[in-house]
Image: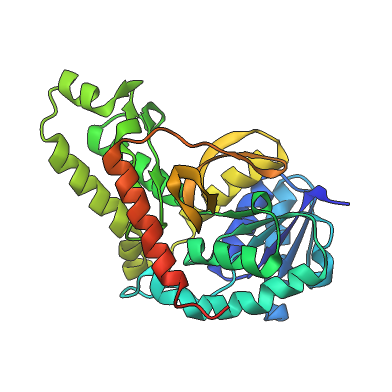
Amino acid sequence: MVNLKKVAIIGCGRVGSTVAFNLIQAELFFEMVLIDINHQKAEGEVMDLSHSSAFSSSIHLYAGSYDDIVDAGLIIITAGVGRKPNESRLDLMQKNVEVFKSIIPEIKKRECEGILFIISNPVDVLTYVTLKLSGFDRHRVIGSGTILDTARLKTILAQYLKVDLKDVDAYVLGEHGNSALTAWSKVQVQNKHISQYLNENKVMGYDMMKKEIEQIVLDCGKEIIKRKDATFYGVSACVKKVATAIVNNEKAILPISTLLQGEYGIDDVCLSALAIISKDGIEEIVETELNKEELDELAKSAETLKAALTKLEI
């Protein structure tokens, strides 16, 4: 029987441990198991995290094995090789596919019924690999996708326009990578389309601004890695957002990586689209209306990922 109040985290590197800390502070779960190829590392993280949990609600926290995930409602996979400053996410592809070829069969063997949440990069490719290796229905396999890109876009737009972050509604779709696209036709600032907002506030250079902001969002991860070797706070906050939607059955609409099966005319590839997230995982893919330019960009993003998939050895 699935226990939605139990979470398993596979991979105890900087992302995994930060995710664990955020989820403990959020008080979403009663039980958390950490799993790592280096069991001592998992034990060390548990010791450290248990001290932080003294100031939140009680949680059963322990280092375990794949046998401990059988009843977990949510299984978060952060394991894998990190991206170097000069690498794209797709450059990591075969390295982390090999990691997943050791992880996913172990999960499948346990006949788990929980939701798999993929964080490792390249997340769209690994979400696809997870589906193929696990045989799970697509509603049970979620990739973090462009949730982080969307958070970055909203933050940068708010800073650029000097407005409150809550006044910005925007999202990024497609690949979590170089072919991602900003759905500018849907961007709103203070409940007005961004072009109207800029016109009313006499902000000039809409097209120039779009290009500049898109480039900043695209380069964010690379710039952070160049300065501090890895990104983990932003993505862990995104994990908490999705986990909250699942545990609380919020039916939140979020841009997550999922297998498309005809939506937007795209088939058999994982990339980010808006989806309703509930206790069952992906309840529904929301095929939002995009303009022709955006649809073309989304199709190109899908082709980029499909081309990458042809190079895989699964």
- Whole-percent x, y for residue 18 in the image: 57, 60
Q: Quadrant of the C terminus?
A: bottom right
Q: Is residue 60 left or right of residue 282?
A: right
- Whole-percent x, y for residue 139 in the image: 66, 49
Q: Where is residue 134, by image quadrant?
A: bottom right
Identified at 30% across, 33% down, the residue is 185
In the figure, 109 relative to 116: above or below? below
Identified at 24% across, 46% down, the residue is 213
- Which colour style is shown? rainbow
Identified at 50% across, 62% down, the residue is 123
Exactly how many numbered labels are in the figure?
0
Q: Residue furthest top?
A: 200
Residue 199 shows in the view: yes
Identified at 53% across, 81% down, the residue is 313
Q: Is residue 211 left or right of residue 159?
A: left
Q: Residue furthest right?
A: 1
Residue sitting nearer the eye, 220 or 90: 90
Residue 156 shows in the view: no
- Whole-percent x, y for residue 138 in the image: 64, 53
In the figure, 192 relative to 257: above or below? above
In the figure, 70 relative to 265: above or below? below
